[in-house]
Amino acid sequence: MKIIAYLDPSSGLSVDIRALMKKYGLEYEDRDIVNDPDQHAEMVKKSGQSMAPCIDIDGYLLAAASAKELGDYLLSKGLVSPHTFAPESLTHTPCCNQADEAMHSTTVRFF
């Protein structure tokens, strides 16, 4: 099985995709669509849209997919077996990162 994951390096959704791949021990190509315009253009050409994450599994595209959608697809096709342990990050979180979380705990004063 060949998997190409077109991902944003810092997006919460992309972090979840990586965690899901690790959970199932899947090898994949992690393509940076933010810092490499050619990868972004390739993703748009293949999928017809510009939203990441976009996952190509042997030519089948999951465009703007969440980790939950990817996991459901992999399980439904018998490409992976269910595991009982939790991944490193949630597989259904909104897009956020550590910097956003740090800002929520910072006191801001307006004068």
Image: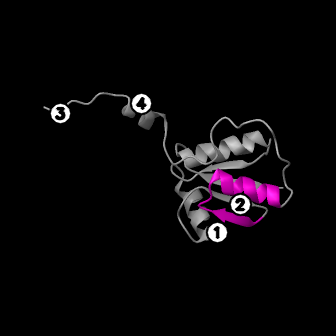
Mark seen at residue 102: 4
Between 3 and 98, the residue placed more toward the observer is 98
Give the mark nearer the N terminus: 3 vs 2.
Answer: 2
Q: Depth check: 76 or 3 in front?
A: 76
In the rendered structure, are the residues bearing label 4 and label 3 in contact, judged by CB atoms less than 8 Å apart? no
Q: Position of residue 70 (x, y in %)?
A: 70, 55
Q: Which residue is mark 3?
A: 110
Q: CA distance from mark 4 to mark 2?
A: 33 Å
Circles 4 and 2, Cβ within 8 Å, touching? The answer is no
Find out whether the residues at labels 2 and 1 contact each other: C-beta distance under 8 Å. yes
Task: Give the residue at mark 1.
Answer: 46
Q: Which residues are magenta?
A: 59-76
Reply above or below: 55 against 13: below
Q: Residues within 10 Å of mark 3 (few under 14, many from 20)?
A: few
The answer to whether one can see residue 2 in this image is no
CA gap, disc 4 and disc 3: 19 Å
List x then y, in percent, for residue 80. Answer: 84, 50
Residue 71 is inside the magenta segment: yes
Q: Secondary structure at mark 1?
A: helix
Foreground tag (4 vs 2):
4
**10 Å neighbourhood of mark 2: few (<14), some, or many (≥20)?**
some
- Please name the residue shown 53% across and 61% down the image: 51
Q: How many marks?
A: 4
Give the residue type that dot 1 points to.
Answer: Lys
Task: Return the x and y of residue 4 as percentages of the image width and height.
Answer: 71, 55
Q: Is residue 66 visible?
A: yes
**Which residue was labeled with disc 2?**
56
Is residue 100 toward the left or the right of residue 73 in the image? left
Quadrant of the image for the N terminus? bottom right
Q: Of helix, strand and loop, which one carries label 4?
A: helix
